[in-house]
Image (cartoon, helix red, strand yellow):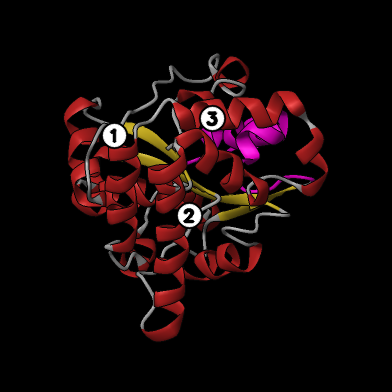
Amino acid sequence: MCDEAVWAPLIPLIAHAAPCSVVDHGAASSLPQMAEQLLRQAPARFALAGHSMGARVALEVFRQAPDRVSRIALLDTGYLPLAAGEAGQSEKDKRQQLLHIAKTQGVRSMASAWVQGMVHPQRLSDAVLMASIVTMFERKSLEIFEAQIHALLARPDARSVLQSLHVPTLIACGDHDAWAPLAQHQAMQALVPHARLAVFADAGHMAPMEQAQAVADALLQWLAAEGIGQARGKEAH
């Protein structure tokens, strides 16, 4: 349900290091389909940063076309498929509850409820930030929301993709991300030993909008990082 507004605070801070474009997944209803669409639009080789569901899409892009991705950044996200049993059913129920609100009360009402757990608790009183997130979600339709829920519930297991990453990798999250907590990102880093883990202070799940400068600094460091082969070559000498 996010769009270019997530990246808007960051792009002016990193545009001098790389030209930036933001992908819209449209009404795609699976992560592999979103990845295929992205690859059709993308340059022959590119750096790829994703936030939340977008980072899961980024992992699917790497699964499909590893030679086209020069480096990857995964922000406020996850890597496991839907859990089996009670845990998986609980996630389904929570997502269906949000969908029910959207269907019966409108996307804005759903967004107003959902956003309460998406930012650092101290930012709940930030009227400008909260309005920008709710309005961003409202720009998407109920049909798109339903398609994205389907995509997330059917998400592939990305453990093997993480283990295959051979490019400069950033794994990052807000220190108060309730949707994708720090422990989840530490588990991801354990699968990608060369990855850098960045934790943004005083930020929740919407870290790029909550702490734009800190996220931009991490992305600039990532963009400047040497390739894995280069770094190993220097170590060998």
Count neighbours of disc 2 (C-alpha within 10 A) and say few if under 14, some if 14 to 19, many if 20 or more: few
Q: Residue at x 54, y 64 (%)?
A: 189
Residue at which label 1 appears: 25
Q: Is residue 196 above or below residue 211?
A: below
Residue furthest front as drawn: 104
Residue furthest bottom as drawn: 85
Q: Secondary structure at mark 1?
A: loop
Q: Amino acid at mark 2?
A: Arg
Coordinates of residue 197 in the picture (x, y in percent) = 62, 55
Q: Secondary structure at mark 2?
A: helix
Q: Would residue 108 be seen by someone viewing this image from the given angle?
A: yes
Coordinates of residue 199 in the picture (x, y in percent) = 70, 51
Residue at which label 2 appears: 232
Lower sequence index among marks 3 and 2: 3
Of the numbered discs in the image, which one, if any, rests on residue 41? none
Count neighbours of disc 1 (C-alpha within 10 A) and say few if under 14, some if 14 to 19, many if 20 or more: many
Residue at which label 3 appears: 6
Residue range in magenta is 202-226
Q: Amino acid at mark 3?
A: Val
Q: Secondary structure at mark 3?
A: helix
